Image: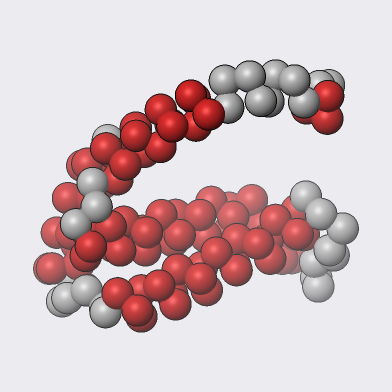
Amino acid sequence: MQIKEAQQTVDEWIRTIGIRYYSELTNTAILMEEVGEVARLMARLYGEQSFKTPELAATAKTDLADEMADVLFVLICLANQTGVDLEAALQKNLAKKTQRDAERHAGNPKLRS
């Protein structure tokens, strides 16, 4: 699915199943909550934090994918509400990073294996 198509799909879902968008402020708060859920799983899967039970660890990878999808969904909602074309924005952002960081990372000894 292309980003533009994802924005259209989420918009249609919101307007038919979700009834309407939450306010931009509410969606921003929800986005922060969802990012926190990703961070919690990352700390347990890739950091030093322990899972409370072995059962939680067993589904963590699936949960991580679902939580990342939640973040993307809410970000798309916010983009739709504010008139941001995420596909164009990402292309512009990558071009900026490419120009800015063309040599910066190559010279960073901390990034070498």
Q: Residue at x 13, y 68 (%)?
A: 15
* Placement of 3 over or under 95, stated as above or below: below
Left of 10 or right of it: where is 48? right
Point out residue 29 in the picture as x, y percentages from the top left corner.
44, 77
Look at the image and tell me whether residue 29 can be seen.
yes
Above or below, 109 relative to 79:
above
Image-quadrant location for residue 47: bottom right
Quarter location, residue 104: top right
Instruction: Using the image as rendered, state which of residue 89 and residue 53 is in the foreground.
Output: 89
Residue 39: percent from the left, percent from the top?
A: 65, 62
In depth, the one of 34 and 102 nearer the eye is 102
Total labels drawn: 0
Where, quadrant-wise, is the N terminus in this rendering? top left
Where is the C terminus found, in terms of image quarters? top right
- Residue occupying image coordinates x 28% and y 57%: 79
Residue positioned 34% across, 34% down in the render: 92
Who is closer to the viewer here, 14 or 90? 90
* 97 vs 65, nearest the viewer: 97
Q: Quadrant of residue 13?
A: bottom left
User: In the rendered view, how is the structure colored?
Assistant: secondary structure
Taking the image as drawn, is residue 66 in sight? Answer: no
Task: Give percent across and percent down for residue 85.
Answer: 23, 46
Residue found 32% across the figure and 41% down from its top:
89
